Image: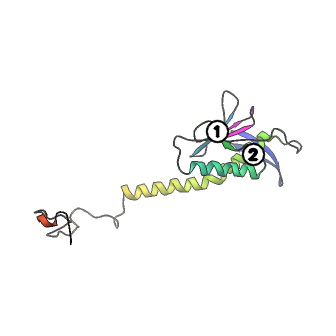
Amino acid sequence: MIKITVNTAEGVVTKEVNISTTLGGDYFLKEHPEIDIIVMPKRNKILALPKSDYTEYTYKIQSKLFELLKRSGVVLPESVKGSNVFGGLEGIYHKNSIKEKQDPLQVAIYMISEFLDQERPKHVYAAEYEKAFHDALTNPSSVESTELGEVPQEEFKGSIPKSGFPNKAIYRYTY
């Protein structure tokens, strides 16, 4: 957990961000269930990598992140491109700020944190829906299930007769 302080239009904002650091001094944000985000201060680079699986939504999420960073002026628009890591997307953030007392690294981490806060409710809802769906299949209510013996028995059920099909009906040819 680190504290980020950023000057915004509303004034000075301080926010705590759940972040890890690597041995090389990079910052690692891994709260998002689909992507990991690495901020590399030595290279002024932001890298978004897919987690274990590259799904159809991974690129959309990465693109959404970099679109937010481009719109907010954190990332240089011409620098956003695919990375040398499979499924990764990267962009370069500004080295210096023309605004006084504004650290570009802190602004970049703050905006990424804002993105994660925007995405969190969607993933909480998806996880709750998945759990409710799983519970409905594995533990159905009494209205949605039947006890053994409640199903009425009929003399003939199914589509295949007990004696098989007559020869002419095997292939179901009609003229």
Residue 118, position as x, y percentages in the image: 66, 54
Please identify the quarter of the rendering in which residue 143 is found. bottom left
Residue 144, position as x, y percentages in the image: 34, 65
67 or 174, which lies in front? 174
User: Real-space Cα distance between discs 1 and 2?
Assistant: 14 Å
**What residue is at 36 percent from the left and 63 percent from the top?**
141
Residue 161 colored magenta? Answer: no
85 or 104, which lies in front? 85
**What residue is at 84 percent from the left and 39 percent from the top?**
96
Q: Is residue 101 left or right of residue 21?
A: right
Magenta range is: 38-54
Please identify the quarter of the rendering in which residue 90 is found. top right
Please identify the quarter of the rendering in which residue 89 is found. top right
**Contact (CB < 8 A) between labels 1 and 2?**
no
Coloring applied to the structure: rainbow
**What residue is at 79 percent from the left and 43 percent from the top?**
5
| Quadrant of image for the N terminus | top right
Q: For numbered disc 1, what is the local secondary structure? A: loop
Residue 46, position as x, y percentages in the image: 70, 40
Q: Is residue 44 left or right of residue 149?
A: right
Question: In the rendered image of this protein, does residue 161 appear above or below residue 86?
Answer: below
123 or 92, which lies in front? 92
Q: Residues within 10 Å of mark 2 (few under 14, many from 20)?
A: few
| Disc on the earlier residue, 1 or 2 | 2
Q: Which residue is mark 1?
A: 83
Q: Which residue is mark 2?
A: 78
